[in-house]
Image (spheres, rainbow, N blue to C red):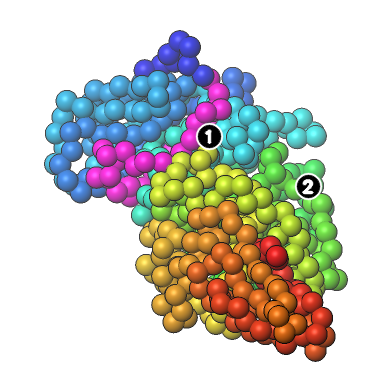
Amino acid sequence: MGVVAGCSLTSQDLRSGGVLKPEQANMDVLFYSIALDVDFINNSINGHAVVTFDFEDTAEGILLDLWHGLQVRKVEVNHLDVSFEHTKDDLLKIGYDITFPAGKYEVKVHYGGKPAKAENPPWKGGFQWEKDSRGNHWMAITCQGEGGKIYFPCKDHPSDKPDLGAELIITVPEDLVVAGPGMIESHTIENGKATWHWKTHYPISNYSIVFNVGKYVLAERDYETRNGNKVPMHFYILEENIQKADKHLTLLERSLGVLEKYFGEYPFADEKVGIVETPHLGMEHQTMNAYGNKFRYQTIGEVDFDWLMHHELGHEWWGNKVFNRDWAHMWIQEGICSFGDALFTLEYAGQEAYNRQMRMTARNVKNQLPIIPGEVADSDEVYQPDIYGKGAFFMHTLKYILGNELFFRILLDFIHEPAYTYIHPVDTDDVEQYFSLRSGQNLKPIFDFYLKTTKWLEIEIRQNEKGAYEARLANFDGVLPMEFETDKGVIKTKLGQDWETIPSSIYPVADPEGYYLKKVK
Ligand SMILES: [Zn+2]
């Protein structure tokens, strides 16, 4: 317990996920309740957290994760004090002298201290204690890479969301506002302090169970979803920026429209669409997305667009509704979400602009490491730029292979499958098998090629002895649709490992629109 001499007091080397600890495989988390008093003078937190979970089998002790830099004072299991040990490698071992039969447990951990400061949020996360331009306190938490354990006791693995949601009961100076996930249950003021009770009933990833504090004003507007449901849009914006709120909500509405068109109804329609202004760039915090792009808009077609807000919003579908079983499959969240960014261009600037954007995406693909580094990976092992761009481009390739109509129908159906959403994590096999089954095509070779290798598709073109052009795929075991620009215009054909004649009297240009990550020889 307490800080062990020589241990790092930063979150620098914290990672989340990876190999599921055997003691935690037996645990199904049901609910997190976190009640903390935030001290802006000492930059510390103090309070308790209750983890409610089921043991599927008998267990010898309870293992939770909690960053070692926080101090645990007391632990209760079902209201009885129990022994515990808080180790320097961020484990909280509870009741290791007790046998716990299968069943439901409530573990209450009393703790506090100075949480780790964010080194480079949101990428190297932690707590960020800032001031806005008027000198008001402004605090944010990011912990996608570090895990919820950076400030609350939890089962730190992406596969297990609390089935029944989470609540945050946060006490701050009374002039400050706390913004969190779900809906406000209550806001009470006592002795100069305000307590904000936020609660969500949706399953939620640990890294989304965070709160933000600032001198916020609430800007709101109702949004009517694609299915005709009314959802409040809530923007917690710094008082100093309130005049920018109205336009920003218009952009939010527009982004919602595009994402709903391709991915279906906003997934958290029973609660809210939330954004909160943060001192870091942004993060996909479910129903309270962090926004720190400072209202720097670009123009797409004729309209203003905020790429950061749109991207984090896209994660409500890919990341929050659909989430990965293991960080090894993080491309599903980042790649498909980034593809959703390009769909805004498709919608507001047209096919040509969208194709151009995808060609630019292709140029930025590194192809140095496979997107899926192995069957199991922690948050650090998987993180690299290609999970975004190459992942998005893979969707572009798949869309070409299947054709727009079939591709979008399968994608839309996938995200409406109860087995792949909300509480059920997915991996790449789930996505591949669904697309293969629904399309009647074996897509495993192309999934593997893009996601598990760093190869570029090699298209060989030659002139045979009769002077005719021929082409084939040199390093892909399968047949793919392919276009060639010839003197007779663009022709569509199918290409495999056998030479295919390309009817052209000039050297044909393979894949002129750029549907593949390729090299032409
Ligand atoms: Zn993202």
Task: Establish if 238 lies above or below 299.
Answer: above
Ligand 1: does it lie within 8 Å of the C-beta at label 1? no
Q: Which residues are magenta?
A: 9-38
Mark with earlier residue (2, 1): 1
User: Splitting the image into 4 quarters, where does residue 118 fall?
Assistant: top right
Residue 85 x %, y %: 30, 22
Q: Nearer the viewer, residue 203 or 258?
A: 258
- Graded by Cα atoms within 10 Å as few (under 14), some (14 to 19) or many (20 or more), the crowding at tag 2 reads some
* Residue 294, numbered label: 2
Residue 130 x %, y %: 69, 30
Residue 384 x %, y %: 60, 45
- Of the residues shown, which amino acid type is indicated by label 1? Thr
Look at the image and say whether residue 16 sits in the magenta stretch: yes
Taking the spot 69% from the left edge, 62% from the top edge, the residue there is 519
Residue 209 left/right relative to 490: left
Residue carrying label 1: 171
Residue 425 left/right relative to 356: left
Q: Nearer the viewer, residue 406 or 292?
A: 406
- Of the residues shown, which amino acid type is indicated by label 2? Lys
User: Splitting the image into 4 quarters, where does residue 392 fall?
Assistant: bottom right
